[in-house]
Image (cartoon, grey):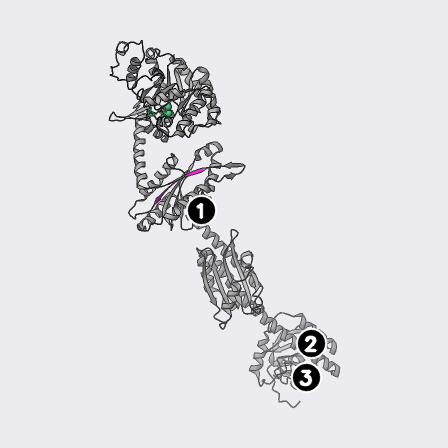
Amino acid sequence: MTEMVQATLSGSVPPPPHPREEERIARLLGYDILDTERDELFDRITAMAAEITGSPISLVSLVDRNRQWVKSNYGIDLKQSSRDDSFCGHTIMDADKLMIIPDSMKDPRFVHNPFVTGEPHIRFYAGVPLQNGDGLAIGSLCVIDRKPRELTPDQIVSLKSLARIVVDYLDIHRSNRELTRLLLREKEIYSRLLNLSSEMASSSFTLEQALQRIMDHLDPTLGWLSCRITNLMTHGSGGIRLNPLLPPDPEIDQIWRQIDSHPTKPLHDGKKTAFISTGITAPQYAYLAIPIRNRGKLQAKIEMIYPDHRKMDSRIKEVFDIMASNLAIVAEREIANMELQHRAVHDALTGAVSRTLFLEELQKTISKTDSFHPDTALLFLDLDGFKDVNDNFGHQIGDRLLIEVTERLRHLSREEDILGRLSGDEFVLLVRHLDIQQDLESLLKRIQRHISHPYMLGDLEIRITCSIGAAILDRNDLTTPELLRRAEESMYLVKHGVRNGYCIATPDIIRDFKNRLDLDRNIHEAVYQKRLLLHFQPIVEIETGRICSAEALLRVINKDGSVLAAFNIIPSMQRIRLMAEVDEWVFAESVRLLQQHMRIFETIPGFRLSLNVSPSILMTHGFATLSLNRLKTAGVSPTMFRFEIIENHLDMGNASLFENITFFREAGVEIAIDDFGTGYSNLQHLISIPCDTLKIDRMFIKVIPSGEAKKIQLLTAMIKLGKNLGYSLIAEGIEHQEQADQLLSLGCEYGQGYLYGRPMEIERFLEHIVMHTPNILPLSKQHSSIQEFEVTPTYALPSKT
Ligand code: C2E
Ligand code: MG
Ligand code: MG
């Protein structure tokens, strides 16, 4: 041994410093193997090396700056030792050469080495430097024996091969470590992404905010080339973002266009994040589509284009799926919030806007009105007979009907229109940007048509119609209550049959309605204050002029004492639903007057008082029984009555109607069809309603003698038909003698009209009877309280033909 040796305190001769020590250490650290766990791969090598060389000990030892660290030990429990005491520290000095110490006791470098003098008493050592062909050995694979010896050439070759395998393993270890490090880094990116997604889920109030955060913080190191975020809830797109770490790609716009024209629209059907090839035109790109779904609807989408599909890590799908579910939570929260807000200002049942919100919107719209070019209309819609639906089928069906009606109205309106429900079955619709002249009427007709289509509610088929009033926003100084009233008033005109289906408010209509409203108020008050009166109009035998009966006609006494005729007051009473009450009064008053003046009425053989009975009361169950009982109690014979009915509102299917009529007739009350020949009466009804008398309407009498030939022919036919069917006939509205003459010649026996006497107060009527009935005492002798009237007969007896 020529080498100069210098022993350490322990007796070792330390290995000389390595000429490229720093490089060597860097290389060693690069393997990232020091202080790692035991590895079976290396253990197998040391076991094999020991076996092949017939050595009891083998090590894979790595030479660190100051120590030798043992990666694998066979036959000895050595983890590390000082570099100075190491044999391997010497081995690495010549990276290309196997170092063999046949007998350490004969080598001055090792003779005092503690591993030689002490355990494990090394006498033989052979080490192959571990290096990668660049002359930098980081350690050695060595075999050790406790006795001096040699290696055979085969053993040397094998040991060298094993050393190469050790180096390969070291390389693999390094790659694995790099991979792990890379994975850790990715993991960090993913976890950052996940953190971002959960953080934005908890801190964003709206989906828009959340998406914006993702757009701003989406990690460019994920390798995407471009990303795009679209919020379908707001129909907005957050735009396209390009990855700042990658060079701009001129193709990118083209790729987005291609995606947008993709015929299958994968994003709209897919439930989960998906990789989708960008197709033939750009096969190297990959498209990542992340749908954000909530309540079965696509609410938003995140889309990314990757420059190369191989750069996409399949795990990102899972990360984005988690992100998508977090975003769906944000969307749900936003929708729920919106619903809460919506509920605050919308009707809970139908979802139409509430009264308050509607009026606010109406006010805003009014203030923007251009009076030169009005383009907005307020529609007030009320369902006809909705109460009946509720009464007959229950509130649940009523509610469902309202929902359906709302749906239809919504369907008929546009996005800028506002649909509100004021109460019950009252809807309001603010229709904007409308060509009033051209389109308002057709819209109203369309609404009418659609609302009246049958509704299928479970097993029920329900039909309903609606009355619509419309007011045009034609001035910006209108107030909301004023406008609402205009529309509502117009609607009422439809309700009360003044208009058909719909009504657009005009100044005339508004004035008329106001008058009607005043009248209704007046009538209402009059009914409650019993300012009611009956007038009597004589019905005579045309041939003789003899009074044979009278019609009681209702009057209202105004506060100033003036009297209102029935044609004015009856529709008002129907409007305010007081007709039944008034009918009762009329009946009671008639009974009272008949009782009171019975002696006079009795002077007229077969005298009857004609009462106009409203259809509703005639269809009331038990009406006849009750009335007949009252007559019995009052001691007035039913044969003193005739009930005049108009068929316009009679329900021919109503059992009570026929029962009442039958009971009355059986008891001796005569039934007359009033206003016969007008639109309401027809032959069908004539056959179905059991009656005794037809009152021919005034319009047929008016045409005598100079009227249209056709109408006269019709009158002739009517009289003939009536007579043939055995009815007694009363002609209404006879004003002239000629009319009486002609009616008589046609075979009509009885008549009523101004010719014989206007409707008059009871006192005057009694006077009239006295004057026109032979053999009757003057009234003054009969009834002291009744004043005498001077009555001049207005008619002459018809000339006998
Ligand atoms: P109506 O039963 O056909 O009554 C006849 C109407 O013709 C009366 O009008 C009467 O004043 C009018 N009249 C009679 N003769 C002539 C004539 O020669 N020329 C003209 N131009 N008119 C004549 P009024 O009293 O205004 O009654 C209108 C309608 O009101 C009645 O028609 C009847 O349907 C209804 N009505 C009247 N009183 C009552 C009542 O107590 N109850 C009910 N439910 N309806 C009533
Ligand atoms: Mg009548
Ligand atoms: Mg009549």
Q: Amino acid at mark 1?
A: Leu
Select label 2 or label 1 by which is in front: 1
Instruction: Say which amino acid is labelled 3.
Output: Leu
Q: Which residue is tagged 3?
A: 98
Q: Quadrant of the N terminus?
A: bottom right
Front: mark 3 or 1: 1
Q: Vertically, is 405 above or below 302?
A: above
Alpha-carbon span between mark 2 and mark 1? 92 Å
Work out whether mark 2 precedes mark 1 in sequence or the reverse, and give the earlier one: 2
Residue that label 2 marks = 58
Q: Is residue 108 visible?
A: yes
Q: Is residue 211 found inside the magenta-colored segment of the image?
A: no
Q: Callout 2, which amino acid?
A: Ser
Residue 473 is inside the magenta segment: yes
Q: Residues within 10 Å of mark 1 (few under 14, many from 20)?
A: some
Q: Residue 759: x, y in percent?
A: 31, 21
Task: Write down which quadrant ligand 1 falls in.
Answer: top left
Gap between marks 3 and 2, in whole Å?
15 Å
Mark 2 touching mark 1, by CB under 8 A? Answer: no
N-terminal of the two: label 3 or label 1?
Answer: 3
Q: Which residue is found at the position 48% from the left and 32% from the top?
A: 392
Vertical position of residue 523 compared to residue 94: above or below: above
In depth, the one of 292 and 488 nearer the eye is 488
Badge nearest the viewer, 3 or 2: 3
Write down the residue under mark 1. 412
- Mark 2 surroundings within 10 Å by alpha-carbon count, few (fewer than 14), some (14 through 19), many (20 or more): many
Mark sitting earlier along the chain (3/2) = 2
Q: Residue furthest bottom?
A: 2
Range of residues picked out in magenta:
465-480
Kind of element beneath mark 2: strand
Instruction: Judge by depth and name the residue closer to the eye, 65 or 148.
Output: 65
User: Residue 68 versus residue 201: which sits nearer the camera?
Assistant: 201
